[in-house]
Amino acid sequence: MRKHLQIHMPWGMVPTIFALAWPTMLEQLLQTAVQYIDTAMVGSLGTEATAAVGATTTINWLIGSTISAIGIGFLAFISQAYGAGEHEKAKRASAQAVLAVLICGSFFTVLTLSLSGVIPVWMQVDLGVRELAGQYFFILYTPMLFRAASIIFGTVLRAAGDTKTPMRVGIWVNIINVVLNFLLIYPGRTVAIFSYNIWIPGAGLGVIGAAIASSIAFTAGGIGITAALWKHSLVTPKGQSIKPDWQVLKPCLKVAFPNALQRFGTSLGYVAFAAMVNSLGEISTAAHTIANTVESAFYIPGYGMQTAAATLAGNALGARDEKKMRDLARMILMIEVSLMIVSGALLFTFAPHMMRLFSKDGQVILLGATVLRMVAVSEPFYGVSIIIEGMMQGMGNTMMPFICNIIGMWGIRIIGTFICTQLLSMGLVSAWACMILHNLLLFVMFTVYYLTGRWNPIKSRLKSV
């Protein structure tokens, strides 16, 4: 009986899983905390300021996720190289990541800055908010080269099993952001602390101050993660050529291209989704923006475990260890579902209280709490999709997730939201209902793929021998 339990419950993998997952969880928790603080600070300026900042959020996702997709190509290559004990090969890949940062950072700098004035128009932002939203977006994307470095170099380090360094850099980025927010958003003021009155200087720049603070913090993060990568003994690009190495780039691009298409397609869907939400008015835009911010904290366990799943799956594939692959999938799925059940229950319970942290508008609070409680119920199902997709990324299989995500986004969420909001004149609740149906469809498709065994390339190769 004990032997049977050990086969089906590989508890020995739990320390390794959490050793990789917890720094990513903490990093994302701190990022979300800063996002909460940013939203609360801007929210104190009024609904118009919140709408100006939130109006281009999905464009941020579109660009960030496209760059992240390139990082996934390097993650698969490096994690498998380490699993196979090919350390020099991993360093060559790290040098190619430097080339990727230079190309992506330069390209997106030119693209975002040149389009900053028209993006709020495309996003159907209210006329009174467009100019401010455009200025915020321009400043936020000025340090695009440094943002690309943070994303891709952070992924390279995680692929080598180092999740603590990106976490440490992220902590400093968040501290810088919060301190500068206090100094740049508000005017100079006197604050009473205990029995002392302390003068705090301030620039009083409002939304523009928030953009400048984030921009400086992103720059510091990019410099910090680059320095950390250069000093890293396992994946330093020092001494390696950054000229195109097609023995490395071809397999990386083979993984990255479908993932980039997936992220671009789904993020473009988020843009279309947000544009339809923005067309519902300022109240819906503010409620949607705040609810998205609140919800992001409750996905932290899921995405932290996804990092561990991707790295360990890549290691197992590199080592050709079929039993480790099978045990990893079983254990990490069990942990993930448990965490997301707890996370969903907390979100459902505290949704109204979380909304009150960011807005004093009763309509915004009620609407945001309603959609948050709706999505809370679906979190455990979405968690399954996150883990299976993460393992497939680590193994270099990004085509099937691409197909599933595009079908779900455009076949369910976008078409459904268009019918509900634009044709039937329904509100934000109907849009989030379509989003939840999208997540449930992903759960069904990924679960079926997992149960058939097609997710595991080692098992497939053993059968074919």
Image: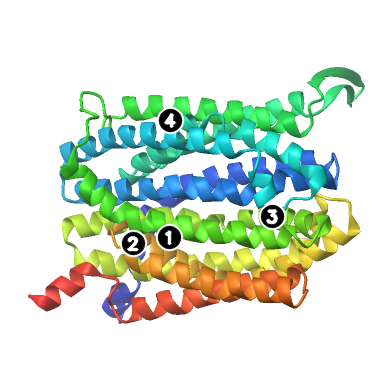
Q: 127 or 60: nearer the eye? A: 127
Task: Say which mark, if any, is on residue 418.
Answer: none
How many numbered badges does the structure rendering display?
Answer: 4
| Mark 2 neighbour density, 10 Å: few (under 14) some (14–19) many (20 or more) | many
As drawn, 234 above or below 431: above
Q: Which residue is mark 1?
A: 262
Q: Nearer the viewer, mark 3 or mark 2?
A: 2
Q: Quadrant of residue 185?
A: top right
Toward the left, the furthest residue is 465
Q: Which residue is mark 2?
A: 398
Q: Which residue is mark 3?
A: 294
Q: Position of residue 454 (x, y in %)?
A: 27, 75
The disc labelled 1 sits on which kind of residue? Answer: Gln
Q: Secondary structure at mark 4?
A: helix
**Any part of residue 354 in sight:** no
Quadrant of image for the C terminus? bottom left
| Mark 1 neighbour density, 10 Å: few (under 14) some (14–19) many (20 or more) | many
Disc 3 or 4, which lies upstream in sequence?
Answer: 4
Query: CA–CA distance between discs 1 and 2?
Result: 9 Å
Name the residue: 79% across, 60% down: 284
Tell me if label 1 and label 4 are in contact, CB under 8 Å: no
Q: Nearer the viewer, mark 1 or mark 2?
A: 1
Disc 1 or 4, which lies upstream in sequence?
Answer: 4
Q: 175 or 67: nearer the eye? A: 67
Q: Nearer the viewer, mark 4 or mark 2?
A: 2
The disc labelled 3 sits on which kind of residue? Answer: Val
The disc labelled 4 sits on which kind of residue? Answer: Ile
As drawn, 179 above or below 395: above
Query: CA–CA distance between discs 3 and 2?
Result: 29 Å
Q: Which residue is mark 4?
A: 225
